[in-house]
Image (cartoon, rainbow, N blue to C red):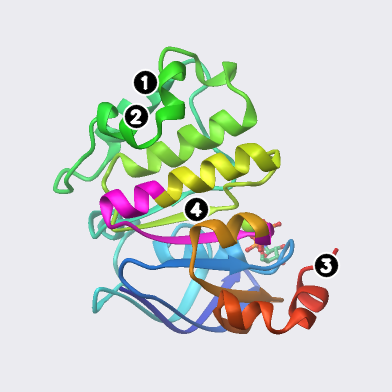
Amino acid sequence: MLEIRGLQASYGDSQALFGIDLRVPAGAGVALLGRNGAGKSTLMKSVLDAGPRTQGELRFNGVALQGQSTEARARMGLALVPEDRRLFATLTVRQNLELAWYAAPRDRPRMTVDTVVKLFPLLAPLLERLGDQLSGGQQQLVAVARGLMASPALLMLDEPAEGLAPKVANDLAREVRAARTALGLTVLVAEQSIAYARQCTEYVYLLDSGQIVFAGDWAAFDADPQLKMRYLAV
Ligand SMILES: Nc1ncnc2c1ncn2[C@@H]1O[C@H](COP(=O)(O)OP(=O)(O)OP(=O)(O)O)[C@@H](O)[C@H]1O
Ligand SMILES: [Mg+2]
């Protein structure tokens, strides 16, 4: 589905990604692990052409992404839930979701608020609350639900569990898994939390200083405890 070869990304003179190769197969859940500054967000933004300057090969369902605008990429079914949740504080949860519906590309299938609430039952009691009347975990849930409103084929979640208590993170992981099953959704999840990422993905890429230092499934990742020590320990 998503294929990245030799991706370089820079901000001005400063290079952040150095020759990334990464594949996200259709229907898969792929975790992108790495500590602060490793390049996780840069990689996700590169896929949407939303920030860094990039070089290298990016393909989505066989179609080259280079030269395509961010909107064109969204129309192809790519979506990102950014690190900062960016909810509208003075709109209700329902309005935040509806706004995403209006903002979604015209030619994509769309979800109704009802369908999203069925997938994420934790949203039901929150629909009439204002964006700034939610806890961090609730905001994150709404941000992920909002990402689904355009029925993306590949949803990229940038550190969805950041700042969440383990119980809340578990709930969110369960809902992401449920959404994957119900919608046949493919996800790429950037995380520093191994525990969270493990719950909603099958494959792991480990990023360090803008380079991939490991790629494999969770069993292979667990088989090498050095990886955690070297690249994720704080
Ligand atoms: N807008 C920007 N301008 C210049 N440099 C940036 C910008 N955004 C990120 N960088 C740099 O690019 C590198 C990768 O940053 P990135 O945000 O991709 O890391 P990350 O893995 O998402 O980290 P975190 O876990 O803290 O979110 C870092 O060295 C960072 O300082
Ligand atoms: Mg980041």
Of circles 4 and 2, the one toward us is 2
Q: State the image coordinates of residue 43 (x, y, percent, origin top left).
A: 53, 68
Q: Which residue is mark 3?
A: 233
Task: Give the amino acid at mark 2.
Answer: Val
**Alpha carbon distance from label 1 to label 4:** 21 Å
User: Residue at 49% across / 64% down in the picture?
Assistant: 201
Q: Is residue 192 magenta?
A: yes
Region of the chain picked out in magenta, as a range: 178-194
Q: Which residue is mark 2?
A: 117
Of circles 3 and 1, the one toward us is 3
Badge 4 crowding class, 10 Å Cα cut-off, few under 14, some 14 to 19, many 20 or more, is many
Q: Which residue is mark 1?
A: 94
Q: Which residue is mark 4?
A: 157
**Alpha carbon distance from label 1 to label 2:** 10 Å
Name above or below for residue 208 compared with residue 177: below
Judged left or right of residue 133, residue 72 is: left
Image quadrant in which you'd find residue 113: top left
Of circles 1 and 2, the one toward us is 2
